[in-house]
Amino acid sequence: MKQTEISSERNSSTDAQNLEPWTNPTVVGKPLPRVDGYERVSGSAIYPADLILPDMLHAAILRCPHPHAIVKNLNTEAARKSPGVRAIVSSADPEGKLVIPYPWWVPEGPPVLLFDQHCRYQGEEVAALAADTPYQAYDALRLMKVEYEELSHLLHAQDALKPGQPLLHNTGNLVRRPDTYQRGDLAKGFGEADVLVEETYETSCEIHATVETHVAVARWEGEQLTVWVPTQAIYEEQKSLAATLRLPVSSVRVISQYVGGSFGCKAELSKHTLIAALLARKTRRPVKLALSREESFLCAGNRPPNVMCLKAGAKKDGSLTALEFTNLGAVGAYADWADAAGWAAGSYACPNIRTQDTEVYINAGKARAFRGPGAAQSAWALEQMIDMLADKIGMDPVEFRLKNVPATHPRTGEPYTSIELRECLLKGAEAFGWTKARVARASSSDPVKRGVGVASCRWITEGGPPTTVIVTLFPDGSATLNMAAADQGTGTKTIMAMVVAEELGIPLQKIHVEHADTGTTQYGKSGGGSHSVMVYAPAVRAAAADVKRQLLEIAAGELKRPAIELSLKDGKIVPVREPGQPKNLSELKDLTRREQIAGIGHPPPEPKGRLIASFGAQFAEVEVNVHTGEIRVIRLLACHDSGRVMNPLTHESQIFGGMVMGIGFALTEQRVLDDHQTGRMVNANWHDYKIPTAKDVPFDQLCLTIDPKDAECNSAGAKGVGEIGTVPTAPAIANAVYHATGIRVTQAPISPMQMLALLAARREAR
Amino acid sequence: MYLRPTTLDQAVDALEHHRAQVLAGGTDFYPALGERLPSTPVVDITAVAELKGISVHETFFRIGGLTTWSELLAAQLPPCFDALKSAAREIGGVQIQNRGTVAGNLCNASPAADSVPPLLALDAEVELVSIGGRRGVLLADFIVGSRKTLRRADELLTAVIVPRVVENARSVFLKLGARRYLVISIAMVAIVLAVDEQRRIRDIRIAVGSCSARAQRLRELEQFLTGRPAQARLDALVMPEHVKSLSPIDDVRATAAYRSDAALILVRRALQMCAS
Amino acid sequence: MNEDHDLKRTDDPCSRVSRRGFLESVGVGMTGIAVASNLSAQDAEELTEDAEPKKLSLVINGRKHMLIVEPRTNLLYVLREKLGMTGTKPGCERGECGACTVLIDDKSRYSCLTLAFEADGHDVTTIEGLVHGEKLGVVQQAFLEKDAFQCGYCTPGQIMAAEGLLRSNHDPSDEEIREGMSGNLCRCGAYQHIFKAVRRAAELKKEEGSA
């Protein structure tokens, strides 16, 4: 996703909802188990894939097996007669020409037709059908006869703009005009440098590979469509579905109460969701459409591959003088983002910078936002580059980074509400035993070499409106929290319930969370960009405060005391002057008469003239076997400034999870397309696309935090944590590999094969 | 057509009369199906009790074809089986070990089948039964290529026979993959090494998997090493030409060149482990 | 549009992205637990052939179920689609991810790689079977306490694998825990907390046993 530098307007009026962050919270900040933990561990949580509706049909999609082809002829007759088949939809139907809108963060792109006869990626949708059972659906698919005209394909970004290459769209293979940013005088900066380094880095296409594949269940009641779909963004999907089907927005209901992992790939309207809705409308029966594992590898999003050319200069004292960063990224067959360079412009204090991001189409599945989109790729290059510079001037990499920690945002000059990057580096290095580990290198005879590496990171988060949250309190002291936020495993539900508990002084067990349903919750921002806590915690707090205010007013009337002399503790009204005489809520007659109090909350606008960002530093220790090229990560330590830690348990889960993903990004994960012949993905399964397993994760994983006591970022004092944890892991590992072997591996992933080839090349060079 | 015999006679009778797929552990069967139900006739042999278990005889061990990897791991076996046990641990997660069978791994005949190198190194023989009778085939002959075996469609692989020749020999299995687990190997090596009283190599078998269409023994290297003292720097004797007989290919997991290098390194390392 | 499209041909009826198609392009074969050769030789026409449903009785979580199912359906399908027991999750349907793990006679097994008929006469335990009334089983409790999950989708499979491990090994070492849990993928990367939870569950089981 494109990095947006923020310049939000702040309402200068003193909003009643503008509360100061808690100084001494009793619930927030505690390592509490999740409020929906019971459902998730007992097997009773109902994910969309688990939904069984009366009379439900099962759908399946016919997909183009070629990376680039024209559908010349499609014959669905035999499939139509196949047992159990109830409906077919294809390019022959008017619905086939429906155009799927791009999500809001992709401003424009070539039209995405539901069934385009020009198939631009392997797995592109050609037709679909619904049958009584999933097996009948798959059997019938195989009876569809398609005549394809295969076109030559384009697989690599580097080839996309060369003459004679296949063109994916009428507009050419360039997604958008290259995005360039410049500050200072690059030539002057390089001139001032004592050392210069130049290097090209590459990252591989990484697949989200959530354990739950994409799935949708659609049901029509008259003209009202309900869709159960795992998504981070119920309102985005609602809006897109309504626009595509030309329905009033209120006629589309999207429900997403459990999401089996997303990391960004379940945040926009996918074709399968629309297909389920169309087949359900044709048959007037509910339809479930679950993608297979293979389909999810091919066409449900990915982190795009990047080729990044960097040149950087520094003075002997460690100060960066200039950075040039040119990136070429392949978004896949349709528009999305594959940027990386622009991120680097905001990372370190460097007076002279030029960055350029160029994005092109290739014949492969489209990219989608993927945990730290752009930032993770950018860090792979920049954080290794920083190490190269440090190495060249003989300075410790931690010290080098400390030298270049920016005081303000280097791109806009705006100050951060808080920045503890320096502390993250220092505290992390100390806890890791950095200085000692840096010196202790393995003996020369042992084929297993040890090394340590560091990388730092930054992630800008945006909170603020529009979002509406409702908290209702019942006379028995129980409450319902109603909000749009999905919880794809981040712990949002738990954290928001904790905010209600904190504010109203009622136990967590008495709070019910009603969420992620456009039919019953109010508009709220999607759960992406690591901003859920920043958007929702202030909103929930404001709603709870609204409830509290109303409650105390009622109590004041009944107790004949000014509201200001009353407080709410442990679910009881406590007169400040007579704390020994608390009153149960059920004793308040007015409250009982009203049945409930509803409080409404919105997040206050972002602070003006300030940026909010999370920071962190991660340290890795690896073992490299120079005989086999095998690499083992034996230790990882993270030290992060994400503002207030709302719940240490779920916070640690986020950071650890990000680091595990980083191990995969660094060492094993890679979409492999068959270059020689077919252009198809040859590892669309979990055996050959290798995500980390229990055996790849070091036992020694540690997560430290620094709380900057940020009173400016929002009323919770919390910043984002969802994505940043994965950003520095891979370059920290690569830097450790360099420390262990003296070999700079620029291409991710660092496979044993690549490692061995580089070791052999060095032997030959000597 | 789905048949579930409970005796060996019923099973081979079923195979005689139907062009059927044999379902044993199913760890290969189901992935092959994709999103479909099976369509060819299926003979599910999982209920045939006489195909399970390991027995010790005067001159050989008999491992029933339906023996799972977990069962093999739990069995009390002499050191020459250590390599096979290591391979069993690598065959997949616990769930696969609980499910996958010895016969299935051999009949599937993947070049990357984990159990093949250790069994080749044990000079194992497979027992095939059809309605017409029983025959024994050396494992080295049984697997003729990538996914190709000498099993006829009417035959069942009922057992693996391991001669009691090198019972107390040391054995080692090494496997290289890009990830620690759920690894389909890039290269693997099994060695069984027996020494005489002077600690000279009396009998050595070296088998390499994943580096040719079928796993194979390095006979020349074996001959070259036989009679030499099993000393510390045995690995230094292994030269690149000793693995020349392998014919690895490039694929999604590794290049041929890497496989050759890896095979050499693994052979050296395994030798070192056996000798020390 | 590029003119280089001389490869015109009619695809076979299996033109849908098929595993078979990939296999041809991979060489050694794409699944380690790979494909039986005679299956890939079959004709597309045979594919819709159906077998007759048969009677089956299954004991799941101590409860007997009489079913009529097509004999070639797997246990995962029967649990979810026939019995509505959706705690057991599909993730890959080919024995790679472990989300569908159940216990058969106390041993952890992938239900996607198990025929329903095979489970006849054996005790099947699913995630739902670990809950006693309203009370979570000890492994579930430990997972909850240690936050050993995030999205929760692979969690039932992880818990069943842990349960299987602890039924055969009451006091697993760290390495044994890792080994025992290695057949279950977690994309959220909760492994560290899962290790903690399994250790905690072992303690809880001991306490339960001694109480």
Image: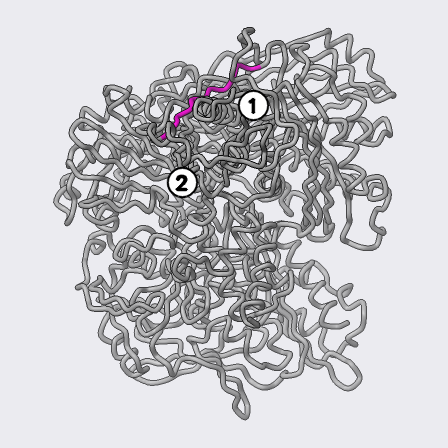
Which residues lie in the magenta part?
A: A596-606
Residue A764: x %, y % from top left: 77, 42
Give the numbered dot on residue A565. 1
Pinpoint residue B204: horizontal percent, then vertical percent: 67, 76
Picture residue at 47% right of the left edge, 63% below the top: B95
**Labels 2, 1: front one:** 1
Residue A240 falls inside the magenta stretch: no
Number of labels in the image equals 2
The residue drawn where x is 46% and y is 24% is A543
Q: Residue furthest bottom?
A: B58
A199 sits to left or right of C99:
right
Residue A725: give x, y in percent of width and height: 62, 35
The kind of secondary structure element at disc 2 is loop
Image position, residue A400 (x, y; %): 81, 26
Mark 2 sits on what residue?
A: A258
The answer to whether marks 2 and 1 mark residues whose Cβ atoms lie closer than 8 Å is no
For the residue labelled by badge 1, is the local secondary structure a helix, a strand or a loop? helix
**Screen quadrant of the C terminus of chain A:** top right
- The residue lying at 33 percent from left, 47 percent from top is A50
Judge from the rendering whether residue C41 lies leftward or rightward of residue A756; answer left or right: left
Q: Is residue A568 left or right of residue A557?
A: right
For the residue marked with disc 1, what is the amino acid? Glu
